[in-house]
Image: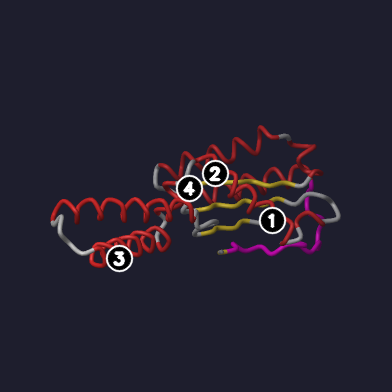
């Protein structure tokens, strides 16, 4: 199963930090500009600055892009595992479930596999697919990277679990957009 998510997590700590920093900076600018300004007016400027910057970070991918890379990777990995089990990929009778998740805002790719296919293939093959996807995406070819990754995953699955004639797939054969 292939899934694409615009954003996996909102990274509120980054948005909050940016809003607080903006409020602090605007306070310093306002006090420098007019040292006799009333506290209520200065506080109003701070509130507006905080709200504007916080909203900017929450409504755009900025918070995800500025979040620490280890935290981004951990959140994408957790989300991928939750999605893997939610979609029933961990309950397939042949234990050959595979999920390819691309988190656009976080700029992360995660492959989650069931134990049956993982014991036959190993982590090196999955990492090769992720590395190829990442290289193509960095070059601006995200759609081609998706197609190649799905094809490569299909080849790996077909090698170890060939489809029987007339066998129905247990999972949807379409891209899941989140």
Q: Residue furthest top?
A: 124
Cα distance between the residues tagged 4 and 2:
12 Å
Q: Residue at x 15, y 59 (%)?
A: 36
Bin the neighbour count of mark 3 within 10 Å (Cα to Cα): few under 14, some 14-19, many 20 and up: some
Task: Look at mark 2 in the image and give the residue it sits on.
Answer: 71
> Which label was assigned to residue 107?
4
Quick one: 165 or 33, which is closer to the camera? 33
Quick one: 155 or 111, which is closer to the camera? 111
Cα distance between the residues tagged 3 and 2:
29 Å
Task: Look at mark 1 in the image and give the residue it sits on.
Answer: 82
Badge nearest the viewer, 4 or 2: 2
Q: Confirm or deny contact between disc 3 and disc 1 (CB under 8 A).
A: no
Cα distance between the residues tagged 1 and 2:
17 Å
Task: Look at mark 3 in the image and give the residue it sits on.
Answer: 48
Q: Confirm or deny contact between disc 1 and disc 4 (CB under 8 A).
A: no
Q: Of callouts 4 and 3, which one flags the residue occurring earlier in the amino acid sequence?
A: 3
Chief secondary structure of the magenta portion: loop
Indicate whether residue 174 is drawn in magenta.
yes
Q: Hey, which quadrant is residue 91 in on the image?
A: bottom right
Q: Work out which quarter of the rendered image holds the C terminus and state it.
A: bottom right
Q: Residue furthest right?
A: 93
Cα distance between the residues tagged 4 and 3:
30 Å
Q: Work out which quarter of the rendered image holds the N terminus and state it.
A: bottom right
Question: Number of labelled discs?
Answer: 4
Bin the neighbour count of mark 4 within 10 Å (Cα to Cα): few under 14, some 14-19, many 20 and up: some
Q: Of callouts 4 and 2, which one flags the residue occurring earlier in the amino acid sequence?
A: 2
SS state under label 2:
helix
Quick one: 178 or 47, which is closer to the camera? 47
Q: Residue at x 59, y 40 (%)?
A: 129
**Residue 153, placed above or below residue 176:** above
SS state under label 4:
loop
Would you say 86 lies left or right of 22 here? right
């Amino acid at each position: 199963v292939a899934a694409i998510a615009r954003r996996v997590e909102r990274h509120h700590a980054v948005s909050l930090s940016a809003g607080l920093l903006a409020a602090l900076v605007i306070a310093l600018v306002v006090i420098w500009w007019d040292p006799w300004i009333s506290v209520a007016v200065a506080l109003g400027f701070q509130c507006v600055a905080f709200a504007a910057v916080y909203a900017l970070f929450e409504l755009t991918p900025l918070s995800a892009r500025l979040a620490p890379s280890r935290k981004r990777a951990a959140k994408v990995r957790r989300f991928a595992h939750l999605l893997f089990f939610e979609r029933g990929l961990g309950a397939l009778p042949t234990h050959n479930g595979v999920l390819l998740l691309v988190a656009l805002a976080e700029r992360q790719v995660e492959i989650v596999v069931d134990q049956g296919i993982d014991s036959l293939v190993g982590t090196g093959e999955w990492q090769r697919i992720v590395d190829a996807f990442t290289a193509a995406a960095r070059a601006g070819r995200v759609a081609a990277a998706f197609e190649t990754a799905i094809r490569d995953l299909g080849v790996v699955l077909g090698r170890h679990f060939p489809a029987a004639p007339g066998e129905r797939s247990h999972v949807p054969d379409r891209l899941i957009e989140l």
